[in-house]
Amino acid sequence: MNEYELLDSGHGRKLERFGQIVLDRPCAQAVWSPKNQNQWKQADAFFTRKKGLEWRGRDQLPDSWIATVNGIKMKLSTTDFGHLGVFPETRAMWDWITETLVTEAPKRKEPMNFLNLFAYSGGATLAGAKGGAHCCHVDASKGMVQWARDNAKLNGLEDHPIRWIVDDVNKFLKRENRRGRRYDAILLDPPSFGRGKGGELYKIEHALLETLDLVKGVLSERPCFVYLTSHTPGFSPIVLKNLIQQLLGKGSFESGEMLLTGAPETYPVPSGTWARWKP
């Protein structure tokens, strides 16, 4: 079941449906003209960054609501920065994670360990859980980790083996290395700029190489995949592919753009990049 749809895009905006709620938000890469201007009248709320950060119509929306995105129930809420608690461009990745883990599981005697770094509201963590993996969800924001736990409960996965960790990612990885903990599948979505649990500054151009080196250190002897995503301008699919190819050497490498999609006649909107490795 899927209750997300890109309805239209253009003139630097995107019109999306999340369950019964339709939102009009900024989208810098949508430089073309909208296909159906009349469709935009159905928006329940509008977010703009032109004069600061402002929602229009937000007071008419519920404080939170539930939408099923590619089979995963997600709690959504409008934030002051225009985010909702889900990045729907990652939903194809969720499907790939679940399918890959399900396919690999019969070849293993024990459940696989899946590590989700910079894990946000947990869509990919729950995709890993649906694939049967034991999961570890790491994010520096206590509020986002609680949001992810709420999403696990919505999906009946509150009792699934998931470790919920509030910590700076690099500090966490160093600790896991020292403890000898290893993971069979790893996803990381590093921010362009962020703060760790203790206020540590994370700037992707300076910190990512260290993060990747630490990721390599916690990979198991029989890894399933490493998946790297980015929303940072300039970090193209080839940049991400080069990074993990340099890190991991031989294997199978793929890369591409993450897309917002809707009906076949709707222009897909590029919204980030990805690269992945399998042995």
Image (cartoon, grey):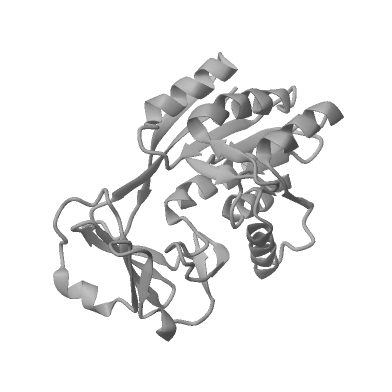
Task: Give whichever of 35, 263 is nearer the camera.
Answer: 35
Q: How many marks?
A: 0
Q: Residue at x 67, y 39 (%)?
A: 169
Residue 228 as seen in the image, left or right of residue 116: left
Q: Residue at x 45, y 25 (%)?
A: 241
Give the x, y percent position of residue 140.
Answer: 66, 49
Task: Give whichever of 99, 116 is nearer the camera.
Answer: 116
Give the x, y percent position of residue 238.
Answer: 38, 25
**Whether residue 97 can be seen here:** yes
Which corner quadrant holds the C terminus? top right
Position above or below: 201 against 245:
below
Residue 198 as seen in the image, left or right of residue 176: left
Task: Give whichever of 110, 68 is nearer the camera.
Answer: 68
Seen from this angle, which residue lies furthest bottom?
Answer: 60
Give the x, y percent position of residue 264.
Answer: 25, 56
Name which quarter of the figure residue 112 lies in.
Answer: top right
**Whether residue 107 can be seen here:** no
Give the x, y percent position of residue 105.
Answer: 70, 39
Q: Residue at x 57, y 30 (%)?
A: 207
